Amino acid sequence: MATECSKFPKLPCREYNEKYLNAIRMFPGNVGMEEKTLQNWRTEIPALFGFYTENKVEGYTETSRMATFLHDNQDLTQFLRFFLNSFQFPGGHMKAKDVKEIIEKDIRFKPAKTIIQVLLEGNKILSSQKSEKQMSISAEEATYCIFNDIRVTSGQTSVREVAELILFNRKNRIKYYNKKDPKVFSSKGTARTKGDVTRYAGDILDYMELANLLKKSHGYYTLRGNEYDTISQFANDKSFYNGYESFYGMQDISLNEISKIEPRWFEYVNNSLNPDLFKTNLQSIFESEKEIDVVFSDRIKEVVTNEDKTTKDIGNLGEAIIYGHELMRLKIKGYEHMLKIVRVVDSPAYHPGYDIESMEADGTDELRYIEVKTTVSKRKIGMNAFHMSPHEWMVAGTIKHHYCVYRLMLSEEDKTLYILRDPVKLYKSDMIEGEIRDGIEISFDSTQFTPTKVLQWQS
């Protein structure tokens, strides 16, 4: 539809609508469709995605930047991220009477941002409980715990409280849908199905999956790995169209006055379109050289000899050592100007399925995704086994060749590192052993792999 819209010049409203309707009618699979359905699509599609704007005062319609951008770039993922980033309640995509109702309930709500924040908070909660599970959400949970809860959409309830509620309800097997609940009745007085009740939230979740923000499995959505920057942009977004703000607190809100805001809303959406948004900021890569001091001999001794050391202490130490190793590896290979791309990305809130992003440094711009598995011991030992969570294993299978497990073994006297590239392929080709147990327990024969010298950063 974006492509079809891009063919139309600025036209009188009626003529543009006729062309647009005909384009929908001729779309494969729509021939013979009822006219009423086609007319609904004609109004719903542009209202949701803003493919065209109508100037009802001057009586003309023109194709929007959103439609032109999608047609020119053919990047549906980036387009849907634009859409989800600006999509809010209230907004011009709604009928004036629905906008009025939302304002009267003091709602200011960005669905995609809220869903991502709830998942991040849920990951923090699960992490604090020593769980390897990823926080997930279903369309039903999003409907009842977010979309249909005014306390959430009006900002009275925090995203942390929402995540806690979802986890509590799961643990206690709380059911949401009740066909006897008057709230699920249609205007005809009959109970809507669960699918009808949850469809709106489900559509947003599906858009987020298409935008590569979420991953869906068995009806539950989790944060997509390997999208640290975009997830952070959504979670920390402060933008919000405030064109409706003057109506809040008013006793009598005019539907006519609300309708006048609609063109300004779509103008805001289209003017917010930044072609560089949700792309890697290459400029930051070429800034001044990163300075870092990674001297860990004393720290290794401290962790090895400390009886109170925790798994987190060991993991943090291993990640820091490999972080320094990667910086030095890139410098030696002549990629010193690209050091800023190396970073630790794993956190209690967001688990991309690996710990560190680096570069292959093989003449390409390909990234290397590193999961660090660290063991410490007083004396040098060979522990050629480690555990990978279900999420890590899934991400490894997705990234394949560019996913590496860095098996790091630390003692007071020695640092030993084995790099296992594409562990899923290694497992399938019998190069490593695996036992499925809440993820997979990996073991390997050290004689089949060459240890890699652990490098230490020197500026």
Image: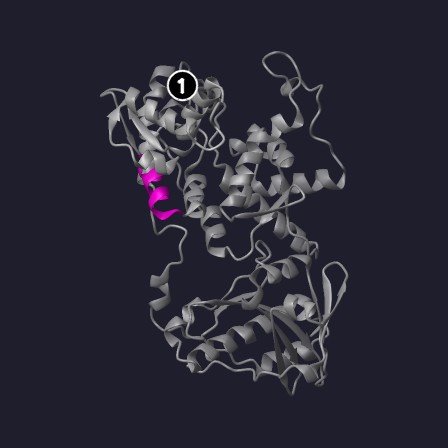
> Visible in this render: residue 99?
no
* Colour scheme: one colour
Please tell me which residue is depicted at 66% across the width and 24% down the height of the picture.
Answer: 193
Q: Residues within 10 Å of mark 1 (few under 14, many from 20)?
A: few
Considering the image in quadrants, where does the N terminus appear?
A: top left
Please name whichever residue, 440 or 17, is drawn nearer the observer in this view of the structure: 17
Q: Residue at left 58%, top 13%?
A: 187
- Residue identified by numbered label 1: 250
Quadrant assignment for the C terminus: bottom left
As displayed, is residue 438 above or below residue 191? below
Residue 68: in magenta span: yes
Q: Position of residue 313 (x, y in %)?
A: 64, 69
Answer above or below: position of 453 versus 310: below
Question: 229 or 196, which is in the foreground?
Answer: 196
- Locate residue 295, reporting x and y percent: 52, 81
Mark 1 residue element: loop
Our reading of the magenta stretch's main secondary structure is helix
For this orientation, the residue located farthest to the bottom is 413
The residue drawn where x is 40% and y is 58% is 280
Magenta highlight range: 64-74
Q: Residue furthest top?
A: 188
Q: Is residue 69 magenta?
A: yes
Q: Nearer the viewer, residue 287 or 406?
A: 406
When the figure is inspected, residue 71 is found, relative to residue 253, above or below; the finding is: below
